[in-house]
Image: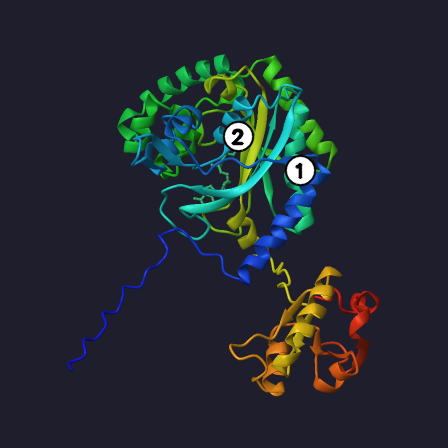
């Protein structure tokens, strides 16, 4: 009979700009996440988890209609079943504010919140810029004072210190209040209108929608024009300037170096007063590690009571990349011990013993193969070595008959061995623990 060759199925790959984080790499993520959690606890920030999918209007209203994010980068779609307009969150500040309003989170005072999770932006992928990326974010909601702006910058600084990151610059600016921004906006439009012929397409589009963003330009010709443009800081009144001074004074007192960058305007619409970014020069064009600021108007914009708030977002891929560039490599997660099982009939005793060891906090990996017990001792020892474990646990027939286990060192003092009674795990388990 003629055989029909099976058709080779097409290989599927991840969506462009969206990455798998594989074992090995994921150990570095877990180490970062656990450092984050401990620093957050030390600043009394609590975790919040909001959905990845939100109503599109949340970002149109919250992030801002004229921002790049809303105009060109959102993954938006209509729910096929009920036609609802939905979006994969491009950032999580509007989501946290929505949740805070919905659950009346600030009914008994301010809340200090943090989150870690994926965000989605349809940008051109390159090193440090992805379409799905992870952000760590903090949002301090219900706090009016500028000392909280300073405190969350200190939090970011403390996190970088614990991680061992070096050469990170902190840039600050103040966007004042709405009336100050409006006065500046008019002056800016008048100024740029003089150069109408020299404006590029982007700048022309922004001139009457979001002229502040022209200050962000990468175009060298425009950069020259921007240099002499009226700066927002010149339009700030005494109150706004005094607030900004508190932020700067606290940071200096706590040993955080900063510079004021009057061109720092941020790409999202909701900011007022303090804005800031943390940069590195070691990651090429994607050097912004953290961006944030105060967003006192956002609660009202999203239908809530007026609630002052301030926060920042950090690109986790960028921080991990910088850690690697600076030679900060976290140890992978190796097991403490690897169980060698020469005979399948020993499995029930072996698994009971491993269960007790794990209950005592020992990380154990068992040799596993399709036909247990068939793999030679030699090949099991090879696998034990390759696993990175410090000890091999040998459940040999002689030992088992005597109710014992042999523990052999695979690392320091290679070959040293000892026997322990199988029935008394709590007495010796500690000797195997956490050497990796
Ligand atoms: P953002 O400046 O848009 O702010 O993003 C914060 C950080 O996320 C950036 O500094 C960067 O490290 C990282 N990031 C942004 N886009 C990408 C990307 N495509 N690939 C990799 N990393 C990226 C916000 O999102 C605001 N929600 C921050 C905030 C919180 N403001 C107040 N509270």
Indicate the secondary structure of the residue bearing disc 2.
helix
Of mark 1 and mark 2, the one earlier in the sequence is 2
Taking 184 as reference, is 33 above or below it? below
Q: x, y percentage for residue 95?
A: 49, 30
**Residue at image mark 2:** 96
Q: x, y percentage for residue 136?
A: 56, 41
Is the residue marked by circle 2 packed among few (<14), some (14-19), or many (20+) residues within 10 Å?
many
**Residue at image mark 1:** 155
Ligand 1 closer than 8 Å to label 2 CB? no
Tell which of 319 and 196 is nearer to you: 319
Q: How many marks?
A: 2
The colour style of the image is rainbow
Indicate the secondary structure of the residue bearing disc 1.
helix
Taking 37 as reference, is 310 above or below it? above
Tell which of 425 and 118 is nearer to you: 425
Q: Quadrant of residue 429?
A: bottom right
> Label for residue 381?
none
């Amino acid at each position: 009979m003629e055989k029909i060759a099976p058709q080779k199925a097409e290989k599927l790959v991840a969506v462009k700009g969206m990455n798998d984080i594989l074992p090995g790499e994921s150990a570095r993520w877990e180490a970062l996440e656990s450092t984050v959690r401990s620093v957050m606890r030390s600043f009394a920030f609590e975790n919040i988890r909001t959905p990845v999918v939100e109503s599109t209007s949340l970002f149109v209203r919250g992030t801002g209609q004229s921002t790049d994010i809303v105009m060109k980068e959102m993954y938006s779609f209509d729910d096929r079943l009920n036609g609802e307009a939905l979006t994969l969150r491009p950032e999580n500040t509007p989501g946290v504010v929505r949740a805070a309003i919905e659950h009346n989170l600030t009914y008994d005072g301010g809340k200090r919140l943090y989150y870690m999770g994926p965000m989605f932006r349809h940008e051109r992928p390159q090193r440090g810029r992805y379409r799905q990326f992870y952000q760590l974010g903090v949002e301090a909601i219900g706090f009016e004072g500028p000392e909280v702006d300073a405190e969350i910058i200190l939090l970011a600084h403390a996190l970088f210190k614990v991680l061992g990151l070096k050469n990170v610059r902190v840039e600050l600016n103040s966007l004042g209040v709405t009336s100050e921004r409006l006065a500046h906006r008019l002056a800016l439009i008048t100024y740029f209108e003089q150069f109408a012929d020299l404006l590029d397409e982007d700048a022309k589009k922004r001139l009457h929608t979001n002229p502040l963003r022209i200050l962000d330009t990468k175009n060298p010709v425009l950069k020259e024009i921007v240099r002499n443009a009226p700066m927002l800081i010149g339009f700030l009144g005494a109150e706004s300037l005094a607030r900004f001074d508190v932020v700067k004074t606290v940071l200096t007192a706590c040993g955080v170096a900063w510079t004021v960058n009057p061109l720092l305007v941020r790409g999202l619409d909701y900011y007022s007063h303090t804005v800031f970014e943390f940069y590195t020069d070691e990651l090429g064009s994607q050097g912004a590690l953290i961006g944030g600021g105060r967003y006192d108007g956002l609660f009202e914009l999203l239908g809530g009571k007026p609630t002052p708030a301030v926060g920042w977002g950090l690109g986790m891929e960028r921080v991990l990349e910088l850690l690697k560039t600076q030679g900060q490599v976290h140890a992978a997660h190796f097991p403490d011990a690897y169980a060698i099982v020469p005979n399948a009939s020993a499995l029930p005793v072996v698994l009971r013993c491993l269960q007790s060891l794990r209950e005592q906090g020992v990380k154990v990996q068992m040799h596993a193969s399709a036909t247990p017990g068939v793999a030679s001792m030699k090949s099991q020892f090879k696998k034990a070595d390759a696993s990175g474990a410090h000890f091999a646990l040998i459940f040999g027939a002689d030992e088992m008959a005597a109710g014992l286990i042999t523990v052999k060192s695979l690392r320091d003092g290679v070959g040293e061995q000892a026997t322990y009674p199988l029935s008394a795990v709590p007495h010796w388990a500690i000797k195997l623990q956490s050497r990796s």
